[in-house]
Amino acid sequence: MAPQAPDISRSFPPRARLRAAADFQAAFKQGKRLSSPQLRLIVRLRSEPGEPRLGIAVSRKVDKRAVVRNRIKRLARELFRQERAGLPAGDYVLVAQPGAAAQPLSALREQLAGLLQRARSLKAPAAGGTMPPFPDASARPATNPPES
C-alpha cells in the first residue's frame, strides 16, 4: 500500500505545532530566513511527505506585557491554520522582532501572509542522490595481478 498524503484541513491539531527545543534548533540551523520589518520566518522544508508545523517565538523584548505577546501568537496561529493546506511540508518558526507590538494587527497579518507566500516558492531539499553511493576500498573487488 502506498503512503497517503496527510489530510490537512483548516484545523490546527497538536501535531501541527513545533514544540521540542531540538526541532527549533534544527530549523534555526538549517532553515532559510525570510524577513519583513517586524517578523522573521525561518523555514526548514522536508523532502519526505508530512504536514507543515509552526513554532512561534515572541520574546519580552517585543513587549513586556504577556497579553500583547499572546495576541501576536494568536494572530500567527490563526493565519497559519488558514494557510497551512497550501504550504509545503516543513517546519516554520515565526520570530517577532522588537517593534511588532507597536504595529496594528492588520499590518502584522499582511507581513505574515507575505512571508508565507514567499515560503511557498521555496524548493524542498533533494531526497537523496540519483547515483548509488560509491563503495569504499574494502568493498571493491580485488583485481587480479598481471601474469608473468
Image (spheres, rainbow, N blue to C red):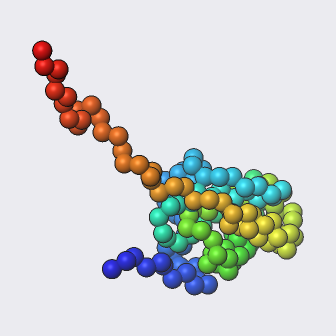
Which sits in the foreground, 22 or 4?
4
Q: Position of residue 9 (x, y in %)?
A: 57, 84
In the rendered image, is residue 35 in sight?
A: yes
Q: Residue at x 50, y 61 (%)?
A: 47
Q: Quadrant of residue 43?
A: bottom right
Is 61 above or below relative to 51?
above
Residue at the far front in the pictured view: 148
In the rendered image, is residue 55 in sight?
A: no
Q: Residue at x 49, y 70 (%)?
A: 50
Is 22 above or below relative to 5?
above
Q: Residue at x 54, y 55 (%)?
A: 125
Horizontal placement of 70 versus 10: left or right? right
Q: Quadrant of residue 36?
A: bottom right
Horizontal placement of 77 versus 91: left or right? right
User: How many callouts does the rendering have?
Assistant: 0
Q: Position of residue 72 (x, y in %)?
A: 74, 69
Q: Residue at x 57, y 59 (%)?
A: 124
Is 80 above or below relative to 93?
below
Q: Name the quadrant of the N terminus.
A: bottom left
Q: Position of residue 37 (x, y in %)?
A: 83, 56
Residue at the far top in the pictured view: 148
Which sits in the foreground, 86 or 113?
86
Residue at the far left in the pictured view: 148
Which sits in the foreground, 4 or 135?
135
Horizontal placement of 48 versus 2: left or right? right
Q: Name the quadrant of the C terminus.
A: top left
